[in-house]
């Protein structure tokens, strides 16, 4: 049974990989100029192994590198991959993944933007393949992450298109069927009818709100069983107000969304089952 964990972890566990999604509302020069906001954002990222970020909206290419330097100011070793500017209007957005290089590796050649037949998606999702750094290395959990921010005015159309995107990603490589679609869907599980067409589909977040005003469920992580049997059944919404002791107006300076996350076993499920009780772990 899926278990909600309040907030986020105090420290990252040795026996789980924590994957988060965070829409950092209009993440650009103005937000990076607010030191108190940047500090909260950096503290959020340090709680997780990978954070899929939506709504990077800046003319400068230095926003994400500057932010990662702030994350690493305490001695952490995070890095990032970032996609192209996307959108049908003059207001373009980028997707980025920020990840802990002590615990995660990225296949840089796998970075790409999903096909967008019929121009159905306002901002087609970005995909990247990751693997955990575990000992022994041949037991690493490998997986696709597909970062998405749907257009709130076109949710039914875009969810329908995302069902096809998900299944295409499952078949993209014969050696990889673990796909985790995550981001700001602008929709909650009751609206996931198109995604339910995916065999074995499930999602982490249900029955709680994910926006900062605590009124909507917009953010989620979607994956399918039995392919992604590494899911540990643990997930949460990191409430910015409660976690960092912020009043609502300050939390809204950080973002109008709270981060959401889920925990996965660091080893491929078949390997994890074979070595139950043995100490393979994230490095």
Image (cartoon, rainbow, N blue to C red):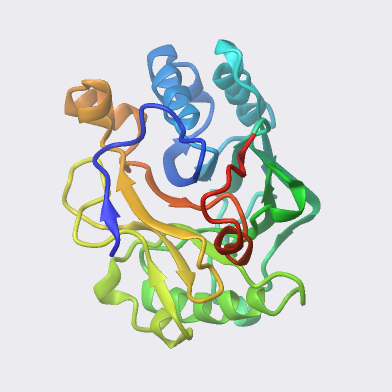
Q: Position of residue 80 (x, y in %)?
A: 67, 36
Q: Is residue 253 left or right of residue 132?
A: left
Q: Residue furthest front?
A: 277
Q: Residue 196: x, y in percent?
A: 39, 83
Pick whichever, 136 or 245, lies toward us.
Answer: 136
Residue at 39% in and 72% down? 202
Figure disc tally: 0
Residue 168 in view here: yes
Q: Position of residue 113 (x, y in %)?
A: 69, 62
Of residues 200 and 268, the one drawn nearer to the viewer in this rendering: 268
Depth order, front residue of 120/187: 187
35 relative to 266 in the view: left or right: left
Q: Position of residue 266 (x, y in %)?
A: 58, 49
Q: Quadrant of the N terminus?
A: bottom left
Q: Quadrant of the C terminus?
A: top right
Q: Is residue 154 visible?
A: no
Tell me what residue is drawn at x 28 percent, y 66 percent. 188
């Amino acid at each position: 049974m899926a278990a909600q964990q309040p907030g986020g972890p105090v420290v990252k566990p040795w026996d789980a990989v924590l994957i988060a999604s965070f829409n950092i509302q209009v993440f650009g020069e103005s937000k990076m100029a607010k030191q108190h906001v940047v500090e909260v954002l950096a503290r959020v990222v340090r709680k997780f192994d990978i954070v899929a970020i939506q709504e990077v909206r800046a003319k400068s290419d230095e926003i994400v590198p500057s932010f990662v330097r702030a994350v690493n100011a305490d001695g952490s070793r995070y890095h990032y991959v970032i996609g192209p500017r996307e959108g049908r209007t003059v207001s373009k957005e980028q997707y980025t993944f920020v990840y802990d290089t002590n615990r995660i590796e990225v296949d840089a050649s796998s970075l790409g933007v999903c096909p967008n037949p019929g121009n159905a998606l306002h901002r087609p999702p970005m995909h990247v393949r990751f693997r955990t750094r575990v000992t022994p290395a041949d037991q690493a959990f490998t997986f696709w992450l597909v970062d998405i921010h749907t257009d709130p005015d076109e949710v039914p159309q875009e969810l329908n298109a995302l069902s096809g995107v998900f299944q295409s990603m499952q078949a993209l490589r014969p050696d990889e069927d673990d796909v985790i679609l995550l981001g700001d869907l602008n929709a909650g599980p009751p609206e996931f009818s198109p995604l339910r067409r995916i065999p074995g589909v499930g999602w982490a977040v249900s029955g709680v709100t994910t926006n900062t005003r605590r009124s909507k469920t917009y953010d989620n992580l979607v994956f399918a069983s039995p392919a992604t049997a590494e899911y540990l059944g643990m997930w949460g919404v990191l409430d910015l107000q409660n976690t960092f002791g912020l009043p609502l107006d300050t939390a809204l300076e950080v973002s109008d969304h709270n981060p959401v996350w889920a925990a996965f076993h660091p080893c491929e499920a078949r390997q994890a089952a074979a070595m139950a009780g043995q100490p393979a772990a994230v490095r």
